[in-house]
Structures are given as structure tokens and as C-alpha cells.
Image (cartoon, rainbow, N blue to C red):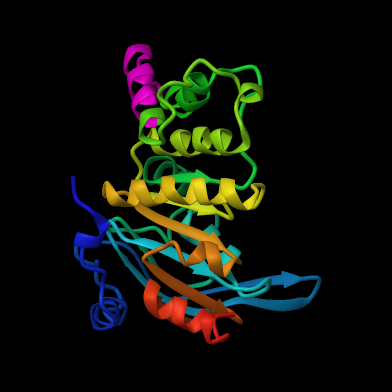
């Protein structure tokens, strides 16, 4: 098992090299590469430039937080990374595939295969057990029952809930429910775990519990992208990308980001 601290973080020079090679497929170690990503919306005749040219490269097995205030473009970037939307301009390569030009049905196929979503609302079926909630994506994918149960059990064990598989959501704490939601996101063995404000509905001690889960998953080699507006949550990631006004304002290792927060310049 590889520890994330043993996996070298991508360097600024390496990232600049890969994002500047327009039109070229990135090497296999890069799971996310965006080049000049722009997204505009027409809001009743007014053009809102949500992203103004984002260059981002994430190496496989990195644990990255994307942070920024409301209106910074972080939600738009998350929607593009998650294949829920497409850019007006620029390239987005996901796991070696150019997805920025894909049609909706192709995007849906890539999204289901490559991305596991975790939201701040748990979205669990109230009458279903933890095991059945985690199995659901595999039901839709047509995976046979025996394999479904085994993979769901493994995913629950990965989030330290192997002893709660037959509990229903109302028998679980908020932190345990979020862990079921994380297990459901993992069960398809995605290239990226994409978490949108995953602690938004949790108190501070439960938030710490969930951060430990993400840390553990990152330690076992899962690529984790976490979107948040909270600096103390972002500081759990190995690398923190701060967006401001639709552009990347900073892209730091955790230690540099923590120093920036301490100095009052991370927002």
C-alpha cells in the first residue's frame, strides 16, 4: 500500500509543462489536465464569466482542495471536472480522454465510470441498509448481485463501516451517513473522488472524522479532489488551489497554504 506522503506531489514546473502543451494528450500519470478553461453564462442578457482561463494539472494519487469565496468560480470548475457541464473554450483531459468536446451521452458514460461524487447532503435511501445504498450504482451498471454485495462490503470497510452494513440511515450518526455516501462514491472504483463541501452539514468534530476518512483514502492511492470555502478544511489536503474571479490565484502545498492562512492572505 502506497502512502500519499511517499507519492511526490507534482511540481509547479511539471504542471506548467503539461498545461502548456495544447492539443497534446497528457502522460498517463496525469488524471486531470485543463488548458485555458473558460465558462460563460448568459444571465438575462448579462454575460457572467465564471471561469476566465483555468490551467490545472492533477497527477494521479494527489489529494487536492479547490477553495475560493462565493463567486470565485470553484463550483463551475467542479461541474466541469465532474463532467456535469462543458466549457465554452479550452481543453479538459480526464484520465487521458479529451472530455471537453464530448456530447452529453458520452459525458454521462465517462462521468459514471471515472468520477465518484460526494455531496454535503448524503442523499441516502432512508429505508435501505448501508449495504444496499452503496450497491445502488452497481445495480444501475448491471453488475451481478454477488459481486455487488462484495464490492459494497469492501467500500464500507474502506470507510471503517464494515460493522454497520445492515443499519439504515436513521440508525447512523451524521458522520456515519456521510461515510456511507463516500463508500457509495467509491464502489465504482473511480479515477477521481470529487467531494463538494463534504463537511457542510456536519459539526466540527464530525468534520474532523470525515477528513480522516479522506486522508486514509488518499493514503491508499485514491485521487481526491475536494471543493470547499473553508480554509481549515482545505488545509487537510496535500495541495490547495485557490480560485478568485474565475482564475487560479494560488496553487500551494499544504504547508505553504497553512502559512498563507496564518498570514491572512489565503482568502
Residue 183: x and y in percent read 44, 34
Examine the image and state in which quarter residue 189 appears. top left
Residue 155: x and y in percent read 38, 31
Overall secondary structure of the magenta section: helix
Examine the image and state in which quarter residue 265 appears. bottom right
Residue 49, can we see it? yes
- Hey, which residue is sitting farthest front in the picture? 205
Give me the residue at 53% from left, 24% from top. 133
Residue 155 relative to residue 194: left or right: left
Give me the residue at 52% from left, 36% from top. 181
Tell me if residue 34 is in the magenta stretch. no
Residue 32 relative to residue 54: left or right: left
Q: Is residue 262 above or below residue 41?
A: below
Residue 248, can we see it? no
Observer-nearest of 186 and 235:
235
Observer-nearest of 23 and 125:
125
Say which quadrant the C terminus sits in.
Answer: bottom right
The residue range painted magenta reads 142-155
Q: Is residue 132 above or below residue 203?
A: above
Amino acid at each position: 500500500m502506497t502512502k500519499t506522503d511517499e507519492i511526490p506531489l507534482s511540481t509547479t514546473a511539471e504542471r506548467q509543462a503539461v498545461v502548456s502543451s495544447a492539443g497534446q494528450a497528457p502522460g498517463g500519470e496525469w488524471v486531470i489536465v485543463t488548458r485555458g478553461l473558460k465558462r460563460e453564462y448568459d444571465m438575462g442578457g448579462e454575460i457572467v464569466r465564471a471561469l476566465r482561463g483555468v490551467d490545472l494539472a492533477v497527477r494521479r494519487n494527489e489529494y487536492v482542495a479547490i477553495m475560493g469565496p462565493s463567486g470565485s468560480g470553484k463550483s463551475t470548475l467542479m461541474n466541469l471536472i465532474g463532467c456535469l457541464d462543458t466549457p465554452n473554450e479550452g481543453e479538459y483531459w480526464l484520465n487521458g480522454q479529451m472530455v471537453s468536446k464530448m456530447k452529453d451521452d458520452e459525458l454521462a458514460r465517462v462521468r459514471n465510470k471515472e468520477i465518484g461524487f460526494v455531496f454535503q447532503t448524503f442523499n441516502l435511501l432512508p429505508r435501505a441498509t448501508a449495504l444496499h445504498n452503496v450497491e445502488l450504482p452497481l445495480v444501475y451498471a448491471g453488475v451481478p448481485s454477488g459481486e455487488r454485495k462484495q464490492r459494497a462490503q469492501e467500500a464500507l470497510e474502506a470507510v471503517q463501516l464494515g460493522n454497520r452494513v445492515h443499519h439504515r440511515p436513521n440508525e447512523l450518526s451524521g458522520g456515519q451517513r456521510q461515510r456511507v455516501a463516500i463508500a457509495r462514491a467509491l464502489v465504482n472504483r473511480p479515477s477521481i473522488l470529487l467531494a463538494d463541501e463534504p463537511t457542510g452539514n456536519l459539526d466540527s468534530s464530525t468534520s474532523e472524522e470525515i477528513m480522516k476518512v479522506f486522508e486514509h483514502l488518499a493514503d491508499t492511492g485514491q485521487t481526491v479532489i475536494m471543493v470547499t470555502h473553508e480554509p481549515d478544511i482545505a488545509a487537510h489536503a496535500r495541495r490547495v488551489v485557490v480560485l478568485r474571479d474565475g482564475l487560479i490565484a494560488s496553487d500551494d502545498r499544504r504547508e505553504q497554504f497553512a502559512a498563507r492562512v496564518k498570514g491572512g492572505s489565503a482568502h
